[in-house]
C-alpha cells in the first residue's frame, strides 16, 4: 500500500488507551493498543511506533534511545492531551489582561448556572490566576449618539476591520500597564491572554499590548483578535484564556514527543487533528484548536470508513467510552459548530458538532424511589467498575459482565489492587445481588414479582441505551431528519457491546483521509451583503495555501458567518455554485443563506438586511488517498471458538452464544445472533434475531431486528418506568429546541426565556424540560383552566393562547400556547402540549411591558384569558392583532410595539407544540395509548414517592431537633409586606400542609404574585431538596396541600397588577420555603429587572447576584439563582445594538454574607447612556438584606443609583421609571447571598 516503502502511523492518544494503526511497507496493517500512562515507558505513541518498527523490521530499536525515523514517512495523531489538561485543570498559569471595568466578566459569563436544581451551584475553576485591568476604551460611533462633546475635544477616529468607525476615548495607559505586567511576570507567570472590548474588529490596542508583553519576556501571548476574532467578548475571551492555558502545555508535550525520536522527527511529516476535523502541522497545533482533537478524529474516521460502505446513507457516529458517549452525524459533509461548552468553558472556535452524554461503560447504577438511574457519576479508571476488584461501584460494565458479555479469559490480567488479577465477575454479581434486595423490596410493595440479577442488569443496560438515544434524537428528529434513514456507526471501547440494542450496525475499515484547514484570517461585521466583499474573500483564498501540499490537490471553499440584522443567530454559509460574474465571483451566498435559514428555522425575514459577522476560507485536500484493502473471501463457514452462556432479555434466560475471533473472519461470512465477536481491542455483541455479516473491506455490518414495544403491558416495571421517564423528557426537550430554532426574538432565541412541557389528559404535568423554574407549576394551572373553560369545545386543530393570572399565567409578557393531542379518533384530548415564552413587548405603560409603576393588570399589556389562537386549523390573525393592539385604548398605554416579532414567535410556539404532538403520537403508536397513559401515571407516582421520602426524612430530623414536625418561616419585602409560611408534616404518611396564612394582603403595586407562581416556587424548592434526578411533574405536589389566603399578596384579585410578582415575589417565596426547611441561606432574592428604551427601541435584561451558602458549600458569585436562569446580553452586542456604553460589569466584592460558607457576591453594572431613553427598574432586596443561616451573616442589599451628568447621585429605590438624558449613568449593585454557619475566628 505504501509506495514510499516507509511506515505510516495513525494514532489516537486517549485518556486511558492509545490506539495505533500502522500502514507498513508491502500493505500490511498493524494495530496496537497501549495504556496512555504506564511507568514502563515515557510516551505511549512513541512506544507503539518503536515496538512496531522493531517487530516489523527485525532490527532492534532500544527503548532508551531515540527512535530511528528513517523508515517513517508520516505520523498523524488525534489526542486528548488538551482536553484532559482542561478537565483536570493542569494547564499553564495565565494572567488575564482585560479592559478596565470588566475584571470579573469571564467569571460571570452569561450568568447562567449549569444545573437549575442544584442549590450547591458548581462553577468550573477559572483558567487564569491573575487579572490586569487595562486603562483603555474604544467606542463604536453611532448615528443615534446625541452625547455632547467639549468643543476642544480631540478624539481619534479609527476604522475597524469591519468598516465600523471607532472613537478612541482612552488610549492604552502604557506606563501603568508595563508596571502591572512586570509585577505579574515577577510572580512567575509566563502566559497572558489579552481580551479587550471590540477587539474582534479594532485590534490595535491588543497588538500594542502584545508587543509590551513580549518585551517584558512573556513566552506565550494569546491575543483574542488573533485567536478567534468574532463578536461577543465573553466567548472570545474564554477561548483566548483556553488558548493561553493550553498552548504552552501542548507545546511541552510536543517537544517531549519529538525528543523521543532521532533528530526530533526531522524529515517526518507530523500532523495533528484539530477540533474542526482538519490536520495541522505540529508547530501550528495550539490550545484553542485542540479541545476535541481526539473525538474529531473519531468523526473523520467513521465518515471515511462508513459512508461509502453504507451506500452513502447518512451516518450516526456513536463513540462510547468509559465515562461518556460522543454522538455525531455525517451525511456527505461535516457538520460544524462555532460555539460549544467544554468543561464549563464557552469556546468559540470551529469544531465538529459532537454531542456528549454522560453515560458510558463506567457510568454508575442507582435505584432511587422506584426508578433505575444510570450516571452521570462515573467510576473512572480508578477504582473503576466493581469487576475491576478495586472497590469500585456498580457500572454498566458490571451489568455486561454479569450478563456474560464480557469474558475474563479474553482480558489481560491487570485488575485487583496490584493490577495482576483477572476480571472479577463474582464481585460484580455480589454487588448486584445486594441491589436486587432493595429493588425486589420495592417490587413486593407494588405487587410485582421478583427480578433476577440478570433481569436487573439487562434493565440498567436498557436504561443507559435510552439515555444515549436522546442525543441521537437531537441530531436527527430535532433537526428534521428521520432517524430510521440513518446507519449507526459504533466505535469506542464500549460501543460494540451496545450497538445492536440501538439501531443499525457499525461501519469500520479503510477510506480516504480528507484534510481541512480553517483559515485564521477574517473580517468582521459587514453591515450589508455587498458584492465588493469579494475582494476580501479573494485575499483570504491566497492566504490559506497549505504549503505542505501540492497546489493541484487543494480546493478552496469560502464561508460567510451571516445573520439577519437585530438577531443573534448566525449561520456559517458556503455559497451556491453559480457561473462567476460581477458580484458573485465566489458564488451566491445570499441565496444559500436564505435557503439554509428556511431549512433550519422554518422561516425567513425578507425585509431585514443581512449582516456578515465573519469571513472564513477552508482549504481542503485529498492528502494521500487511502483505499480500503479488500480482505480474503470466505470459503467456509466461520469458526466458532467456543460456546458460552449469555443472558438476553428476548429469551428471558441464558442462551448458548458462539464466540468468534475477528481475525479469522473473512468477507461474506454471516453470523446469526446470538454471538460475540472478539479481538484484542473490542467486543461486538450480536443479539438474537440479528445477523452480522463481514463486508469485503472487513467491516462488521449488523442487521438489527425491528423491535416493537407492543409487548410492554400496563403492569409497573421499574425498567420501563425509567425508559418512559427519558422518553417523556425527550419530548419536552425537543419541543424546546424547535422553539429556540424557530423564534426570532432575543428573549426566546438567545436569552432562552421559555419553557416547554407535556401534560396528561387531566391537564396534570407529565414532564417539563429544565428551562425556566418560574414556569414549572404555573403551566399546569394554565392547561387545567382551559380544560374547565372550554369543556366540550376543544377540537383537533385548535391552539389556545393565554396569559391571564387567573388562567394560570405568571405575568402578561409570558404567553402560553396550549395544543391538545388527539389520537385515533378520540373525542377528547389524550394529552396536551404547551410552551410559555417571554415576549419582548405586548403593550402597556412602558416599552418592554415591565412597568415598575403599574397598579392594575390592564396597564401591563395585552390580556388573553381563553383565546383560540388557531381554530380548527385556521390561524386567527385578525383577532390576535386586535387583542395585541387593545392596550392603546387605555390612558398612557400603547399597543404592542413589536407586532411582527409577536406574530413570528407565536408561530414558533405553535411549531414547537406541533413537534410535541408528533413525538407523543409516535410514542403511542410504538407502545399503545393505554400503556403510555398508564406509565404517565406511574411516572407521576414515582415523583410523588420521592417527595414523600423527602418529607419523611425532614419530619424525622425536625422531630429530633425540635420535638415538632411543624416548620415556620417568614420574610419581608421591601415595602414591608410579609410572606409567612407554616408547614405541617405527617411523618408517617409523608404528607404535608403548606399554609401561607399570615401573608400580607394584596398591594397597590405590581409585586402581587398569582397563585400559580406559588405552585411553581413550591415544586421548584421540593425538586431542589430531593437532590437527585426525578421526573418533574404534578406528582411532586400530591403530598402537598396548599393554603393561600384569597386576596393576599399570593392570590390577588384578577385585575391586580402582577408583573413584579413573577420576577420578584417568586424569588422571595423560595427564600421563605428554604428558610423553613433550614436548607441554606438566602440568595439575592431578586431578578434585577432593567428596561430602557424610547420610541425606536426597547431593551430588557435580568441581572445576576449572589447565591446563598449552605451546609457544605460556599455561595457562588454573579449568578442567576432559583426562579430564573436567563442569559445576559454580551457587552459587545449591547453596545452594537443600543446607544449605551457598558462601563463596568464585575463582582461587587464583599457583598456576600460572612460565614463558614460565605454567600456569593452580587455584581456592579454601570450603563452609560448616549441617547435619551426611559429607564425602568423593578427590583427587590434594596431594604431588607438576604438572610444568613446558622450564624452566617446576611448578604448586602442592592442599590439602584442614577449618576446624573451634572454630578448628582440619585437613589432610585426598588421600583421606578425615570427619564434619562445623554451623559447619565445607571449604576446597579445587585444583592449578595447570605452566609451559612458562623465564620471561623
Image (tube, rainbow, N blue to C red):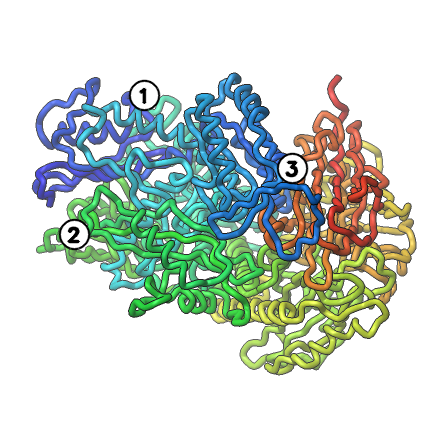
- What is the spatial separation of the Cα atoms under label 1 and label 3, in whole angstroms? 38 Å
Is residue 816 in sight in this rendering?
Answer: yes
Which quadrant holds the N terminus?
A: top left
Q: Which residue corresponds to the image point at 68% horizontal and 66% vertical from the top-left?
A: 816
Quadrant of the image occupied by residue 912: bottom right
Q: Nearer the viewer, residue 163 or 52?
A: 163
Q: Nearer the viewer, residue 883 or 718?
A: 883
Report whether 1090 appears left or right of 211: right
Give the residue pinned by disc 1: 39
Give the residue pinned by disc 2: 627
Q: Which residue corresponds to the image point at 81% horizontal and 55% vertical from the top-left?
A: 852
Which quadrant holds the C terminus?
A: top right
Give the residue pinned by disc 3: 120
Quadrant of the image occupied by residue 133: top right
Numbered disc 2: secondary structure: loop
Q: Earlier in the sequence, mark 1 or mark 3?
A: 1
Amino acid at each position: 500500500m505504501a509506495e514510499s516503502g516507509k511506515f505510516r502511523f495513525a494514532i489516537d492518544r486517549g485518556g486511558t488507551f492509545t490506539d495505533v494503526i500502522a500502514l507498513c511497507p508491502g500493505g500490511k496493517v498493524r494495530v496496537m493498543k497501549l495504556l496512555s500512562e504506564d511507568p514502563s515507558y515515557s510516551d505511549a505513541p512513541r512506544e507503539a511506533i518503536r515496538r512496531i518498527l522493531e517487530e516489523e523490521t527485525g532490527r532492534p530499536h532500544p527503548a532508551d534511545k531515540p527512535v530511528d525515523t528513517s523508515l517513517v514517512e508520516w505520523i498523524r495523531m488525534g489526542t486528548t492531551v488538551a482536553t484532559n489538561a482542561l478537565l483536570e485543570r493542569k494547564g499553564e498559569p495565565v494572567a488575564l489582561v482585560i479592559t478596565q471595568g470588566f475584571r470579573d466578566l469571564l467569571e460571570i459569563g452569561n450568568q447562567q448556572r449549569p444545573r437549575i436544581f442544584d442549590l450547591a451551584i458548581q462553577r468550573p475553576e477559572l483558567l487564569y490566576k491573575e487579572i490586569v485591568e487595562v486603562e483603555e476604551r474604544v467606542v463604536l460611533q453611532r448615528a443615534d449618539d446625541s452625547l455632547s462633546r467639549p468643543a476642544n475635544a480631540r478624539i481619534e477616529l479609527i476604522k475597524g476591520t469591519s468598516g465600523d468607525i471607532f472613537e478612541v476615548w482612552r488610549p492604552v495607559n502604557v506606563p501603568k500597564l508595563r508596571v502591572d505586567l512586570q509585577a505579574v511576570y515577577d510572580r512567575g507567570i509566563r502566559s497572558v491572554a489579552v481580551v479587550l472590548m471590540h477587539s474582534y474588529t479594532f485590534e490595535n490596542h491588543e497588538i500594542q499590548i502584545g508587543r509590551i508583553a513580549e518585551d517584558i519576556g512573556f513566552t506565550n501571548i494569546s491575543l483574542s483578535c488573533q485567536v478567534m476574532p468574532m463578536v461577543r467578548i465573553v466567548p472570545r475571551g474564554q477561548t483566548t484564556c483556553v488558548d493561553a492555558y493550553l498552548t504552552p502545555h501542548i507545546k511541552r508535550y510536543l517537544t517531549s514527543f519529538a525528543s523521543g525520536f532521532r533528530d526530533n522527527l526531522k524529515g517526518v511529516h507530523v500532523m495533528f487533528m484539530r477540533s474542526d476535523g482538519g490536520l495541522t502541522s505540529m508547530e501550528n497545533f495550539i490550545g484553542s484548536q485542540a479541545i476535541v482533537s481526539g473525538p474529531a478524529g473519531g468523526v473523520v474516521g467513521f465518515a471515511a470508513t462508513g459512508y461509502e460502505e453504507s451506500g452513502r446513507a447518512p451516518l450516526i457516529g456513536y463513540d462510547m467510552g468509559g465515562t461518556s458517549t460522543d454522538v455525531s452525524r455525517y451525511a456527505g459533509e461535516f457538520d460544524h459548530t462555532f460555539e460549544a461548552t467544554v468543561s464549563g468553558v464557552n469556546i468559540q472556535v470551529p469544531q465538529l458538532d459532537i454531542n456528549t452524554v454522560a453515560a458510558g461503560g463506567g457510568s454508575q447504577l442507582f435505584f432511587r424511589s422506584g426508578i433505575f438511574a444510570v450516571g452521570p457519576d462515573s467510576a473512572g479508571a480508578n477504582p473503576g467498575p466493581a469487576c475491576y476488584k478495586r472497590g469500585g461501584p456498580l457500572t454498566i460494565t458490571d451489568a455486561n459482565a454479569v450478563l456474560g458479555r464480557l469474558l475474563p479469559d479474553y482480558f489481560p490480567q491487570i485488575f485487583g489492587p496490584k493490577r495482576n488479577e483477572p476480571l472479577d465477575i463474582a464481585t460484580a454479581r455480589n454487588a448486584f445481588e445486594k441491589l436486587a434486595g432493595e429493588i425486589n423490596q420495592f417490587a413486593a410493595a407494588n405487587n410485582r414479582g421478583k427480578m433476577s440479577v440478570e433481569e436487573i442488569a439487562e434493565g440498567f443496560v436498557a436504561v443507559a441505551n435510552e439515555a444515549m438515544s436522546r442525543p441521537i434524537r437531537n441530531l436527527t428528529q430535532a433537526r428534521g431528519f428521520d432517524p430510521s434513514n440513518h446507519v449507526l456507526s459504533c466505535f469506542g471501547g464500549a460501543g460494540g457491546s451496545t450497538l445492536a440494542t440501538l439501531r443499525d450496525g457499525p461501519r469500520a475499515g479503510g477510506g480516504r483521509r480528507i484534510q481541512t484547514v480553517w483559515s485564521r484570517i477574517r473580517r468582521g461585521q459587514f453591515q450589508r451583503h455587498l458584492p465588493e466583499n469579494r475582494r476580501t474573500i479573494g485575499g483570504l483564498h491566497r492566504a490559506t495555501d497549505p504549503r505542505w501540499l501540492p497546489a493541484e490537490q487543494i480546493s478552496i471553499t469560502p464561508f460567510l458567518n451571516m445573520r439577519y440584522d437585530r438577531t443573534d443567530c448566525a449561520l456559517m454559509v458556503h455559497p451556491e455554485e453559480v457561473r462567476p460574474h460581477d458580484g458573485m465571483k465566489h458564488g451566491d451566498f445570499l441565496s444559500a443563506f436564505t435557503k439554509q435559514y428556511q431549512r433550519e428555522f422554518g422561516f425567513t425575514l425578507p425585509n431585514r438586511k443581512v449582516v456578515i459577522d465573519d469571513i472564513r476560507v477552508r482549504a481542503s485536500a485529498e492528502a494521500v488517498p487511502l483505499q480500503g484493502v479488500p480482505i480474503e473471501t470466505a470459503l467456509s463457514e466461520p469458526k466458532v471458538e467456543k460456546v458460552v452462556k449469555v443472558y438476553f432479555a428476548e429469551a428471558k434466560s441464558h442462551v448458548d452464544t458462539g464466540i468468534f475471533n475477528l481475525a479469522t473472519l473473512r468477507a461474506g461470512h454471516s453470523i446469526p445472533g446470538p454471538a460475540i465477536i472478539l479481538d484484542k481491542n473490542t467486543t461486538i455483541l450480536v443479539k438474537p434475531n440479528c445477523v452480522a455479516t463481514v463486508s469485503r473491506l472487513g467491516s462488521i455490518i449488523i442487521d438489527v431486528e425491528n423491535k416493537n414495544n407492543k409487548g410492554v403491558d400496563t403492569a409497573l416495571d421499574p425498567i420501563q418506568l425509567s425508559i418512559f421517564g427519558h422518553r417523556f423528557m425527550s419530548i419536552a426537550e425537543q419541543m424546546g429546541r424547535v422553539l429556540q430554532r424557530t423564534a426570532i426574538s432575543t428573549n426566546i432565541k438567545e436569552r432562552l426565556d421559555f419553557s416547554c412541557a407535556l401534560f396528561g389528559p387531566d391537564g396534570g404535568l407529565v414532564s417539563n424540560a429544565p428551562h425556566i423554574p418560574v414556569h414549572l407549576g404555573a403551566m399546569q394551572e394554565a392547561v387545567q383552566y382551559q380544560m374547565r373553560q372550554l369543556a366540550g369545545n376543544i377540537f383537533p386543530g385548535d391552539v389556545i393562547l393565554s396569559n391571564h393570572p387567573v388562567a394560570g399565567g405568571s405575568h402578561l409578557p409570558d404567553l402560553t400556547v396550549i395544543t391538545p393531542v388527539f389520537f385515533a379518533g378520540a373525542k377528547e384530548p389524550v394529552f396536551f402540549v404547551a410552551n410559555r415564552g417571554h415576549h419582548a413587548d405586548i403593550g402597556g405603560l412602558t416599552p418592554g411591558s415591565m412597568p415598575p409603576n403599574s397598579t392594575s393588570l390592564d396597564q401591563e399589556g395585552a390580556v388573553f384569558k381563553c383565546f383560540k389562537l388557531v381554530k380548527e386549523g385556521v390561524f386567527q390573525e385578525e383577532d390576535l392583532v386586535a387583542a395585541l393592539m387593545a392596550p392603546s385604548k387605555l390612558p398612557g398605554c400603547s399597543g404592542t410595539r413589536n407586532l411582527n416579532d409577536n406574530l413570528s414567535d407565536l408561530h414558533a410556539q405553535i411549531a414547537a407544540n406541533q413537534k410535541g404532538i408528533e413525538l407523543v403520537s409516535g410514542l403511542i403508536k410504538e407502545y399503545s395509548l393505554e400503556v403510555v397513559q398508564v406509565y404517565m401515571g406511574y411516572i407521576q407516582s414515582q415523583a410523588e414517592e420521592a417527595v414523600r421520602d423527602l418529607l419523611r426524612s425532614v419530619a424525622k430530623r425536625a422531630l429530633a431537633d425540635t420535638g415538632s414536625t411543624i416548620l415556620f418561616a417568614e420574610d419581608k419585602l421591601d415595602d414591608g409586606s410579609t410572606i409567612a409560611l407554616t408547614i405541617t408534616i405527617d411523618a408517617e404518611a409523608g404528607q404535608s400542609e403548606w399554609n401561607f396564612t399570615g401573608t400580607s394582603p394584596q398591594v397597590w403595586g405590581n409585586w402581587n404574585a398569582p397563585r400559580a407562581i406559588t405552585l411553581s416556587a413550591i415544586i421548584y424548592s421540593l425538586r431542589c431538596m430531593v437532590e437527585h434526578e426525578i421526573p418533574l411533574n404534578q406528582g411532586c405536589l400530591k403530598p402537598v396541600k396548599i393554603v393561600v389566603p384569597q386576596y393576599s399578596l399570593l392570590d390577588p384579585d384578577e385585575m391586580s397588577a402582577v408583573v413584579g410578582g413573577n420576577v420578584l415575589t417568586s424569588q422571595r417565596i423560595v427564600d421563605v420555603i428554604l428558610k423553613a426547611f433550614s436548607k441554606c441561606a438566602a440568595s439575592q432574592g431578586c431578578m434585577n429587572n432593567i428596561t430602557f428604551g424610547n420610541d425606536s427601541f426597547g431593551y430588557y435584561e435580568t441581572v445576576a447576584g449572589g447565591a446563598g451558602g449552605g451546609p457544605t458549600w460556599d455561595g457562588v458569585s454573579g449568578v442567576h439563582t432559583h426562579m430564573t436562569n436567563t442569559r445576559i446580553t454580551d457587552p459587545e452586542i449591547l453596545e452594537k445594538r443600543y446607544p449605551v456604553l457598558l462601563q463596568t460589569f464585575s463582582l461587587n466584592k464583599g457583598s456576600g454574607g460572612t460565614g463558614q460558607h460565605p454567600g456569593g457576591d452580587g455584581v456592579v453594572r454601570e450603563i452609560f447612556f448616549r441617547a435619551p431613553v426611559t429607564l425602568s427598574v423593578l427590583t427587590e432586596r434594596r431594604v431588607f438584606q438576604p438572610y444568613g443561616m446558622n450564624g452566617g451573616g446576611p448578604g448586602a442589599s442592592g442599590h439602584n443609583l442614577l449618576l446624573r451628568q451634572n454630578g448628582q447621585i440619585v437613589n432610585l429605590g426598588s421600583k421606578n421609571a425615570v427619564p434619562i438624558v445623554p451623559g447619565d449613568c445607571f449604576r446597579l449593585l445587585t444583592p449578595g447571598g447570605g452566609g451559612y454557619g458562623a465564620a471561623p475566628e
